[in-house]
Image: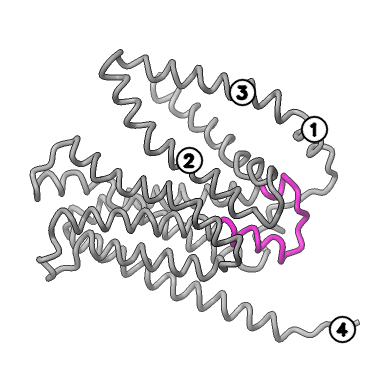
Amino acid sequence: MSLLFRIIAAVGESVVAPTAYPLGAQQFSEKNQGKAISVVECCFGIGMVFGPSLGGVMYNAFGFSAPIWLLAALLLLIFGTSVIFLEKRIKTQLNTKEETLWRDLFMCPGLIPNVIGLIIAGTAYNWYSASLEPYLVQQFGFNAGQVGLILVGFSCAYTFLAPPFGVLFDWGLSPLYAALMGNGVIMLSMFLLGPIPGLDDLNNIPVKATALVLHGAGTSCTYLAALLGMVESIKAGGLPQTEQTTGMVTSVWLMSLSLGAFLGSLIGGYLYDIIGFSWLCSVEGIAVGLTTICLVGAALLGRKTDDNYQSFE
């Protein structure tokens, strides 16, 4: 029954997330779209930071059922406010007759490279999820609380840097260059977290804490850049700018993240047993770097090809 209810909860989360981003972006003008999406992403990060800690505190104080019942009450409250404040907007959007097909969505220029880049960045997010705790326990004698404390660096950087990145996007920062910068920071963080075999002087707690903060910063930048890059792709492809289209783009974005997280956990956990933590992180850093170079090259080549097209009347 626990497994069944977890599956039901996951279905609900997969319905909420694709609608939260477009509904959040609709509250602002198009020139402030980056800020709007970054605020929604920041709220997701806040939940990621405080959810486990508050849930753990309530579990220790009141037992297993307390955090679940509190979350259920909060969800009911959100449901009621959404019905009151979003009902008119939803009815307006449902009257739109324009329809977007999945085939047309994936034919938009630049969408596939964004998806591939996002999957690779998603693998880095969960690459060490199964190995970091046993590694820190064996290497430095950490307990569970200390492992959780060092992981907060990633979550805090991911959360609190999302709004500044959103402002930069609204000021004209290109999603392509932002993705290059974000993946570059992720690559550096993986090399420091390992660290690279042979650099034993970097194998200490301050360097690993710094690496996790850098990983959170790079992930925040890359995730926002990929989402805004997909939005630019559908505009370039001439698709109707409706809530349905935006929801489909957000769904693709979330599916790419989920696929990357699944592959990262699976492959990362398997390689840890074979090559160890240091080589594990180095392999992922090299993979992120090579993939980023290839995708940026493909995007620049596609832009150059588009510039050579001539219009005939």
Label 1, secondary structure: give it: helix
Question: What's the residue type where badge 1 is placed?
Answer: Lys
First in sequence: mark 3 or mark 2?
Answer: 2
Residues shaded magenta: 227-246
**Disc nearest the viewer among 4 and 1:** 1
Q: What residue is at 16 percent from the left and 57 percent from the top?
A: 276
First in sequence: mark 2 or mark 1?
Answer: 2
The residue that label 1 is drawn on is 91
Give the Cα separation between the discs numbered 4 and 2.
47 Å
Q: What residue is at 43 percent from the left and 48 percent from the top?
A: 160
Q: Does the magenta stretch include residue 239?
A: yes
State the image coordinates of residue 134 (x, y, percent, origin top left): 16, 44
Give the Cα separation between the discs numbered 3 and 1.
16 Å
Give the Cα separation between the discs numbered 4 and 3.
52 Å
Give the Cα separation between the discs numbered 4 and 1.
41 Å
The residue that label 2 is drawn on is 44
Crowding around mark 4 (Cα neighbors within 10 Å: few <14, some 14 to 19, many 20+) is few
Q: What residue is at 78 percent from the left and 39 percent from the top?
A: 93
Q: What residue is at 44 percent from the left and 70 percent from the top?
A: 292
State the image coordinates of residue 22 (x, y, percent, origin top left): 65, 45
> Magenta stretch mostly in which secondary structure?
helix
Q: Is residue 134 magenta?
A: no
First in sequence: mark 4 or mark 2?
Answer: 2
First in sequence: mark 3 or mark 1?
Answer: 3
* Residue 79, numbered circle: 3
* Residue 312, numbered circle: 4
